[in-house]
Image: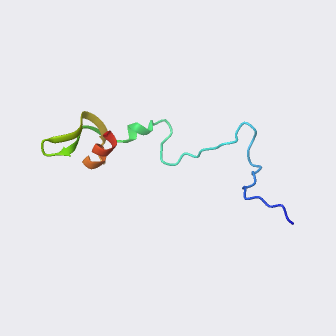
Amino acid sequence: MTDTTAQTPLGTDFTASEALRVRRLFTTPGVHPFDSVEWELRDARIGHGDRVAFEQKDVEFPRTWSQNSTNIVSQ
């Protein structure tokens, strides 16, 4: 019977102090990720007519997000 394992073997291309490496993909060196997004203040409101289930004023969200996304995440 052969002894097998489902684990991926460790490579040998790292040093002891560098076991985990995360490569930069969507950000720019020296620029905070939040500074690369255009933000705006909105009011979040969930309800129908005069019946309000949730409301929060002046929440800051990315300009590209829909109002529905703002309402859901705010809640």
Q: Position of residue 45 (x, y in %)?
A: 22, 41
Identify the residue at horizontal 19%, vertical 40% (top origin): 52
Can you say whether 47 is above or below 3 in the image?
A: above
Q: State left or right for residue 27 relative to residue 58.
A: right
Q: Nearer the viewer, residue 25 or 8?
A: 8
Q: Is residue 21 visible?
A: yes
Q: Quadrant of residue 16?
A: top right
Q: Position of residue 43 (x, y in %)?
A: 22, 38
Identify the residue at horizontal 77%, vertical 49% (top origin): 12
Identify the residue at horizontal 36%, vertical 42% (top origin): 37
Q: Quadrant of the C terminus?
A: top left
Q: State left or right for residue 3 relative to residue 32.
A: right
Q: Position of residue 72 (x, y in %)?
A: 31, 45
Q: Position of residue 23 (x, y in %)?
A: 58, 46
- Picture mark count: 0
Query: Residue furthest toward the left?
Result: 50
Identify the residue at horizontal 70%, vertical 42% (top origin): 19
Q: State left or right for residue 48 relative to residue 62.
A: left
Q: State left or right for residue 59 relative to residue 2.
A: left
Query: Residue furthest toward the bottom?
Result: 1
Q: Nearer the viewer, residue 71 or 52?
A: 52
Can you say whether 64 is above or below 44 in the image?
A: below
Q: Is residue 38 visible?
A: no
Q: Quadrant of the N terminus?
A: bottom right
Q: Quadrant of residue 33?
A: top left
